[in-house]
DNA sequence: TTACATGCAAAATGTTTGCAAAATC
DNA sequence: GATTTTGCAAACATTTTGCATGTAA
């Protein structure tokens, strides 16, 4: 675990938990930690490989890196882009009934409009 | 609906239902339908916009285009890459209990190893 | 003859890589 | 001094775009 890797890991863990590589890089610079975007990618990938964090492909733009490594779902607000983890208590049961092959992992992705955006309409993304 | 759009739509509908733009383009050429890859993308996007097909970001490489437009889950075999639609009967109930915001759509993605790959081990992707 | 569909090449995007320079042990 | 780790720029893969050309009503 290199110094940069440790810094990136800390940044992600002290955040909301869902950051894009670009955001992590920006926070780095703000904190005075130097590291190029490519190094950030490189280190994040290492962290993923070693199981410290996970990487999620949301579907529209960049991937996000997630401090949570256990399988879980994500709700993505189509309006403000916020990402929220969700528990998916029934999935495991459901998956248990599938008798084809061996499950490795799963991800439930829900697109929605969060209450903030419904309420305070107007603050478009 | 242009001629190319119609052809692409037909190709997708007469297939397993999950194809990459690249594959669709290849099938086009094989069938003697001329159309560049960029036109294929352009037309597929139009078909998506107009609700005839859907587009799914699997997570690793290219997107796939799906003839099924109703929300459903996908099982992706990590070994051979095959994609299988799955019913997710309990999800709807579960989503009903979330009282934050308004659900637009969802996608459950399950990575697994299919029986074919477990059985006939060796035919690596 | 006008509008629209297409092909081509170039741009855009997000990410990875090769290699030399720098930092670390 | 040897072995990482890094920065930079270039490569990369997938997808989109601009514009000139073609096709068809």
Image: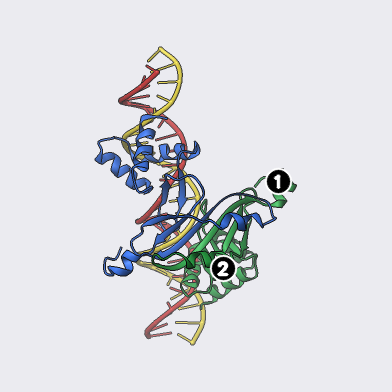
Chain colours: A blue, B green, C red, D yellow
Residue B91: horizontal and vertical position, in percent? 54, 64
Quarter of the rendering containing residue A122: bottom left
Instruction: Name the secondary structure under disc 1.
Output: loop
Q: Nearer the viewer, mark 1 or mark 2?
A: 1
Rendered residue at 48%/59% (across/down):
A109
Residue B32: horizontal and vertical position, in percent? 62, 68
The N terminus of chain A, quarter of image = top left
Residue placed furthest toward the right:
B120
Instruction: Name the secondary structure under disc 2.
Output: loop
The C terminus of chain A, quarter of image = bottom left
1 or 2: tag closer to the N-terminus: 2
Residue carrying label 1: B123
- Closest to the observer, D10 or B24: B24
Residue carrying label 2: B34
Residue D4 against residue B93 in the figure, above or below: above
Rendered residue at 41%/59% (across/down):
A76
């Amino acid at each position: 675990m290199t110094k940069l890797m440790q810094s990136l890991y800390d940044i992600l863990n002290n955040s909301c938990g869902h950051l894009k590589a670009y955001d992590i890089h920006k926070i780095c610079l703000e904190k005075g930690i130097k590291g190029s975007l490519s190094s950030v990618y490189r280190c994040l990938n290492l962290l993923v490989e070693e199981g410290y964090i996970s990487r999620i492909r949301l579907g529209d733009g960049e991937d996000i890196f997630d401090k949570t490594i256990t399988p879980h779902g994500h709700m993505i607000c189509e309006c403000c882009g916020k990402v929220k983890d969700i528990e998916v208590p029934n999935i495991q049961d459901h998956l248990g009934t599938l008798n084809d092959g061996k499950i490795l992992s799963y991800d439930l992705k829900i697109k929605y409009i969060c209450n903030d955006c419904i309420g305070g309409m107007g603050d478009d993304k």
